[in-house]
Amino acid sequence: MNRRTLEEKIFIVLMLASVFIVMGSLILIVAVITLNGVPSLSLEILTQTSEGGFYLGPGGGFLNAIIGSLLLALPATGLAFLFSIAIALYLQKDFLHPSFANFIRLCLDILWGVPSIVYGVFCLTIMIAVGMIGGSLLFGIIALTLLEIPIITRSIDESIKMVPTGLKESAYSLGSTKFETAVKVVRRQAMPGIIAGVLLGFGRGIGDAASILLTVGDSNYFPSSITDQTAALPTMILNLVSMPDQVVQNKAYAVAFILLVIVLLISIITRYLTKKSSKHIIK
Amino acid sequence: MSRIKRIDVLKNKLLLVSIVSLIFSFIFLFIFKFFFLFVGFLVLFIILLLYNFIKVTRKLYDVVGTRLMLFITVSVIFIFFLLLASLIQGSFRIIGEESLSELAFSSTWKPFSGEFGLFAVIVDTLIVTAISMLIAVPISLLSAIYIAEYAPKKFRNIVRPFIDVLAGVPSVVFGLCALLIFVPVVRDTIAPFFGNKISSGFSLFTASLILSIMVFPIIISLCLESFNSVPLALKEASLSVGATKWETVKKVIFRASGPGILSAIFLGFGRAFGETIAVAMVIGNQELIPKSLFGPGQTLASLIASTYTEVSSIPILASALIFVALILFIVVLIFNLLGYFVLRRASKRWKY
């Protein structure tokens, strides 16, 4: 065995080790959260709000946080989707000069990299300017929408780039306008990317703590209007962890377990739907 | 004939929907007191009503649709500059009261007595980010190479979902795991091993460990993208002159996708630099210049998360925190631009 093959052998071992570190860390995270979270789960904790003694003792539940998180993430994803699909379709060569489109892509990439806490602070400055300190559902939705737009746009844009030019040209040659081609032909062809992007954005939105930490405040009840403060799953985990009582701290793992289940479900749904929708695209 | 009929039916349906939306808007106004939804449904009603009475041609569709898309696209640039402008405008107040050099080079952060020195926090941030990148880059690079070049196809199909899911795990969950696993491990094993017996486990090193795990999926997926775009002919040429697979990887693939790797590292750096919650949960939250890696610290992002609650009692603190956010934004901006220019230069020089 000479030096060259020895070097190769050593690096293959190192590579295998690092792949198992990466995979192992995910397995570890899922295992730890499941093992600690499942024992403190019960029907009661899933179906009650956290009024009264949820942060003090064994009773109560976190249904209001689940509803709050959904009320934050669903409208935000919807809004972000409307913005993203328009942007991504408009970035095509048919509408916009490529150099200008690349400038907008650069802007979006920078926004993609901006830490979510910056969006939180941005909404905080608006809140201070408007005079609504304490937070509300509305500002949480704004922060999450801003966070999700670059994520969703990027994914849709990637799949729109794959749409064959011939397809667009045949749509034009049949007499359809640019807008019709974009909305009816390109949108259908890019469906797998759209689904993946929307669900990816939703997953990021529902799990992101930093942006909503500053903007939604906290509450023990269901939000009754859009200007109410609300609880959300990630911020509730932070609140629970900072409590001194061990029984209360264990509830944080139950909340984290629910959050992790939501994220895993989103991932599975994405796989299923993209597979299903990519059957119908024209290669 | 049938097509015209279908359009008529469609229009009737739209009229029905518009009336239903009017009813909904009043329900929301009077029963639930959701003013925003009332306005939303009212607008929907008006639009649908107009749709029924204005003759909509395909040309009008095209013009209105295209203009609307242009408007939304331009608004993204507007958001970008609004973000920058509002952060700059918000941090005017703190820059006016304390000089920039005092903000950057004084290391006493005591908001209650009006001292806002960020030096210690900046040093901590750089240390944490640097260590996490030192851990994350080799591991991610090696795994990306394995997945792209060595792994059998079956294994590749198993690993890809793992990386996607890891990228989607919320940062709070990472923080919680770090709290449960890394903090005791650092306190009981790693810190005593390096001769630090008083470490509480809430330390710079713990934060770097969890950050490196959070950065794995970003670097791996970006590197995989650029490894997969290396043309097969380049690899075949290298293999045909007798190079081993590892030599091909080292001398051809790494070199051909060098800019891609570099820009992946920049993006990973940006992510690690701005990560907030997971860091805030394990770093100890004390604005000190670190004496050892196993002591508590504070990063720029976690500073915002752990002190924002006092904004209402100290008005100028808000301005200081906005200034911190501005630093984060500008650093991320610079690193993204660097990544972009590296890639662009490379794509000009490398034409294969």
Image (cartoon, rainbow, N blue to C red):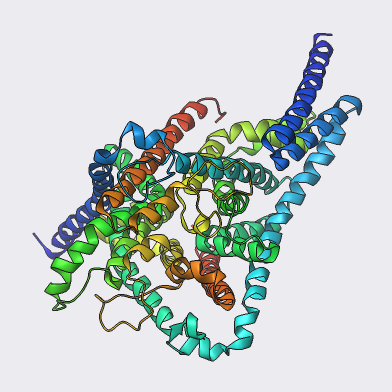
Q: Which residue occupies the foreground of this view, A276 or A185?
A: A276
Q: In the current view of this chain or complex, which residue is farthest to the left? A: A1
Q: Where in the figure is residue A240, as x and y percent of width and height? A: 36, 53
Image quarter hosting the N terminus of chain B = top right
Q: Quadrant of residue B3?
A: top right
Q: Which residue occupies the foreground of this view, A211 or A194?
A: A211
B86 with respect to A27 (left or right): right
Q: Which residue occupies the foreground of this view, A39 or B234?
A: A39
A279 with respect to B180 (left or right): right
Q: How many marks?
A: 0
Q: Where in the figure is residue A226, as x and y percent of width and height? A: 63, 45
Q: In the current view of this chain or complex, which residue is farthest to the top? A: B1
Question: Is residue B213 shown above or below A155?
Answer: below
Q: In the current view of this chain or complex, which residue is farthest to the right? A: B54
Question: Is residue B240 shown above or below B66?
Answer: below
Residue B243 in view here: no
Residue drawn at 65 percent across, 38 percent down: A165
Q: Quadrant of residue B255?
A: bottom left
B176 with respect to A76 (left or right): left
Q: Which residue occupies the foreground of this view, A205 or B28?
A: B28
Q: Where in the figure is residue B173, as x and y percent of width and height? A: 35, 51
Question: Is residue A118 shown above or below B319?
Answer: above
Residue drawn at 22 percent across, 57 percent down: B181
Q: Where in the figure is residue A117, as x and y percent of width and height? A: 51, 62
Question: Is residue B300 shown above or below A74?
Answer: below
Residue A213 in view here: yes
